[in-house]
Image: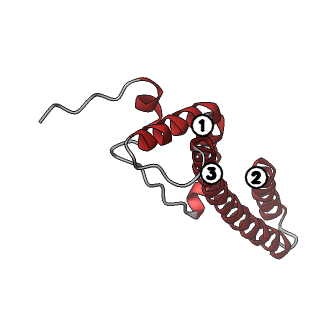
Amino acid sequence: MPPKQPQLGSLAIQAPSLTPKTVHVSPSTCHDISVFKDLINQYRKLDDTINMRLNRTTAQYRDREREGLGGKGDVEEQACAHVWRELVANWSRRKDIVDYCVAVVDQSLEEKRQSLQSAGDDASAQRKAKGLLYAEEVKVRTL
């Protein structure tokens, strides 16, 4: 049996990792802006490499057709449809994360508003509650 050919070129760079990293999004992910931004940037990588992905997927579908494993229709159309499904699934997952984090931060914002109202006449407690409220509002604008 011949040795497995090493991955070369863009496929080697963009192929899925052998040890995929699963990120469990939690409220702490939403409150840590750098973690949130890093997560969203990972989702943007598919968008940013669209030309390369189209070219690579088209080549893969051409190879399948040469091997007699081709599907129905034109190779370019099949490749385009495959990349489109990847993009839509990626956008859906990214939207779900953003919606979840917006809801988490909105809930936290509402809790801070309630604590500001319950602070009463205590100036120190009001300043603290206003500071926390401002920090949550900054997060909302960032999301």
Circle 3 sits in a helix, a strand or a loop, which is it?
Answer: helix
Q: Residue 135 carries which label?
A: 2
For badge 1, the amino acid type reads Leu
Instruction: Tell me if residue 132 comes above or below residue 15 in the rendering.
Output: below
Where, by quadrant of the figure, is residue 64 drawn? Answer: top left
- First-in-chain label (2 vs 3): 3
Q: Mark 1 points at which residue?
A: 54
The quadrant in which the N terminus is found is: top left
| Circle nearer the viewer, 2 or 3 | 3
Q: Say which of 122 and 136 sits in front.
A: 136
- Is disc 3 surrounded by few (<14), some (14 to 19) or many (20+) residues within 10 Å? some
Looking at the image, tell me whether mark 1 or mark 2 is earlier in sequence order: 1
Q: Earlier in the sequence, mark 1 or mark 3?
A: 1
Residue type, mark 2 in image: Ala
Q: Position of residue 81 (x, y in %)?
A: 62, 51
For disc 3, the marked residue is 81
Residue furthest to the right: 121
